[in-house]
Amino acid sequence: MADLILNNLSLILPETVLTVTVMLVVLAHLFDRRDDTVVHYLSLLGLLGAMYALTGKMGENLSAFNGMLAVDPFSLFFKLVILLSTVVVVLMSRHSAEVRAERGLQGEYYFLLLSMALGMMFMVGASNLLMMYLALEMTSLTSYVAAGFTRKAKDSAEASLKYLLYGAFSSGVMLYGISILYGLTGTLHLAGINQALMQGSVNGLGLAVSSLLIMVGFGYKISAVPFHYWTPDVYEGAPVTVTAFLSVASKAAGFAMMMRAFAVMFTDTAAQLPAGAWAFVQGIPLQHVLVVLAVATMTLGNLVALWQDNVKRMLAYSSIAQAGYMLLGVLVLGHDGAAAVMVYFAVYLFMNLGAFLVVMLVANTIGSEHVDDYKGLGKKAPLLSVAMAVFLVSLTGLPPTAGFIGKWMIFLSLINAKMVGVAVIGVINSVVSLYYYVRVIRNMFLREQEKPTGTVFRLPAAQVILLLSLLIPTLYFGLFFNELVEFAQYSVTMFGVR
Amino acid sequence: MEQTFLNIGILTWLTFLPVVGMIVVLLLPKEQKTAVRWTSLAFTLAQVVFAGILFAKFDRNLAGVNSAETMQFTELFNWISVKSTAWFGTIKIDYYLGVDGISMPMVLLTALISCIAVISSWNIEKSVKGYFALLLLLDTGMMGVFVALDFFLFYIFWEVMLLPMYFLIGVWGGPRREYAAIKFFLYTLLGSVLLLLAMLALYFSVTVVDPASGERIHTFNMMAMMNPANYDPQSLLAGAHTYWRYVAYLAVFIGFAIKVPIFPFHTWLPDAHVEAPTAISVILAGVLLKMGTYGLLRIAFPIFPDAALYYLYPLAFVGFINIIYGAFCAMAQKDFKKLIAYSSVSHMGIVILGMAAMNTQGMLGGMMQMFNHGTITAMLFLIVGVIYDRTHTRGLDDFGGLMNKMPKYSGIMVVAFFAAIGLPGLSGFISEAFSFLGAFQTFRWLTVASAFGIVLTAGYMLWTLQRVFLGTLPEKWNGLTDVTGRELVMLVPLGIIVLVLGVYPNLMLDVMNTSANALVDFVKAGGGMAVGN
């Protein structure tokens, strides 16, 4: 037993590095509660270390801890997305007025961020339902606290509580589904469940019900309609940094977990399909459910975003809509759809975090997230405004920005699967989304500030560098996406899948 | 045939010169307004020179259209090449530029109109730097659309144009600029996403042999999409006259129809024109609308010849509606600019009708009309701009008796107006005559009915002339001055083109003739596929 653990520990070196960092952060915080410099750089160092350790796992396709975790290209890709977004968020947090206002709690803040990241890294690797559940809970519990981090703000507390209630409920439902599936198949390993399903002796109704119940858990994590109700309130109430983190990393982890569950557990391995296509085992109604979820998610996300006046809340609904587009890639059920989702995430990482970064920097100076307060920003803070415009145009999916490539890959896989109807709904949705994204751009450039105030934008150099390092990839990947797509296509390989 | 300058192909120069100009403009300090203007002018002038070289060296005997060999000045580089996997073929996108008789006149027009737009923007005072930077970016987008032979590249250029246009209308426009700008943006985006889906469906339907590896790969090459032999029999768009081919054609058609704009997708146009600053109206009418009809010629017709033939009559019919409806709307306008905008709708109808005739005369007429309308309407909008700059009103009823006050102005305006009416000896006559001549052979009664539009055009144009020039001069305009040197510089070249092409149309017809014939033959033959009708 001890041997097994020791042997496998090297496989989860990135996670180990991160765990050690988490502990060090707690310790460092004990010594000096006032200054956040130490914990900040410690977190950064730990994250970079974990990333370095991760690159060492490139190309491995193994299973660790008796099939509990998979260490494969698929998990590596998502771990990279999660770690990168954690780095960005940690860098953002250094100059977040909201976070800094909570004096003496910085250590806890970084502890929470890193723990969330750790939980997410386990989520993307989990290849056992129990492991999935545990990782999900680890992420969720820390997220609840992080969402309520700004203790004095009422909406932050509300966000935290709402998040907790929804989270507890949906993970309970998911657990119920898992228990039914366990009863039907006698195992919790994804591959084992698949074997049992392929033998065909499983009760059809039970299987359908349990798969739907498990889907609730996934739907909650990726905030798909109708499990999205927590999202706007949490995103609005939580500090911007946490919101940014939740909207990218948490979503990535949820999608990764869901796709692995579909590809490994629910795929009909005996079906005669073209290479790279998946199909659900007979009796699992999830493809239709996914179509309905995707269409509902993007349509509702977009339509409600049209009415939002708070930019943060607007971005919350936009991220719901974005999840809808990504679901389009999942419902194709195949390697090409999965690769498209992964490209989308890589791109989404830059553009969405970029948009939130601008929101944070603007809020730092003018103390508001209201869209009307963005009026005339184009003149006062040209760099911020141009960057924001690029991020928003990219979120809309217009060339020559990276967002277009993400959408393009999704629609490529949809048309390849001849799902024209869904694709049409998808593209019309992106036309609708233009309206609310452009609303911010309009206020920044087309409108003048009504009551001129003397606010001067002073951006810390570190934040300008961060902004540029999010902006440049957003433009670069729009025109040169060779490597990105190749990396994503290489990374669809999951342990145990042909 | 290749033409390079400093080892870079001439089409790349043409397309990306404005972007270089944009970068230079952005690097200039904000206060140097004059420097910004002169830089923009220098770059657009250089573009005109390149376009002139292209026009001179263009081989009039090569057809282009569906044959890659007879495309001229081609540049082909590998842009995106994603390695193939077991479950997904390679993704190969080329940087593929070239011109033929369809695009050559448009390239010339784009360079010319962009340069004139810069001159007419001289009096812009608000955020000069941003304005010219966006204008130059817009220029690149437009030029790229006309020279791209790879569908993906075409689409990128097509979309690149949207954002600068949004800002140019939205920031520097009239009172209702925000509404007009977002309406333009949403309409065009709606059209282009349909285009996107059709493009993807085409991509998966067409395979060609990759010269590098020898395997069959999907491609965005437009010429490959025109060859029915390249279609994979199992694919969505294989065969001829299938349900999906019709659907895809309609998607592409709507994408382009919104740009033209074809009734009932035209409602963005009057708003955009009225609110846009003069130079942007000139670009809108002069170049942007042609991108719609160009798209039909370059993509919709030759890639979907079966569907194009099937929908020929409906196409002619919307052309007829455009002509008559546009003319009636123009007649009812009291706003000078709106009148010109609706006259554009009417005149683009003639392009559509001529193209729908699907014979040499009609096609040539349509293509010629694209160029002529570009020059004539640009003149008309400039003329409105001149008077608006002086009086800050565009109400037709506010004027009268300007003939004596502004003689030079009136002379130019008369030329432009008579060209728009289609008076023999001016360029508009040639193209309209050809369009109607061609259409008459195919759709007899529809053409007769459409020709009534010419009477209407003469009606509202002459009425406008009367309202503006004749009668008595209102007292308040006693201080009006005639056109300035700068205004002459932008108006006279266009006037000369209108006159020269009216007397010697072969100058332009020569360029288009071979390609127009080839396109008609190709489409009529159903693109080489067995057409059942």
Image (spheres, rainbow, N blue to C red):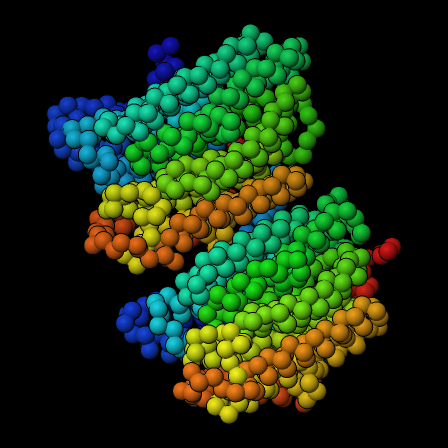
Q: Quadrant of residue A221?
A: top left
Residue nearer the viewer, B338 or B287: B338
Give above or below for B153 relative to B350. Answer: above
Q: Is residue A423 visible?
A: yes
Q: Residue at x 21, y 24 (%)?
A: A26
Give above or below for B298 relative to B230. Answer: below
Q: Quadrant of residue B396?
A: bottom right
Residue A495 x/y as whole percent: 51, 26
Residue A56 x/y as whole percent: 37, 34
Q: Split into 4 quadrants, where in the image is the N terminus of chain B?
A: bottom right
Q: Is residue B368 visible?
A: no
Q: Is residue B275 left or right of residue B260?
A: left
Residue nearer the viewer, B50 or B186: B186
Q: Residue at x 53, y 22 (%)?
A: A215
Residue B373 x/y as whole percent: 62, 75
Residue B223 x/y as whole percent: 68, 61
Q: Quadrant of residue A193?
A: top right
Q: Split into 4 quadrants, where in the image is the C terminus of chain B?
A: bottom right
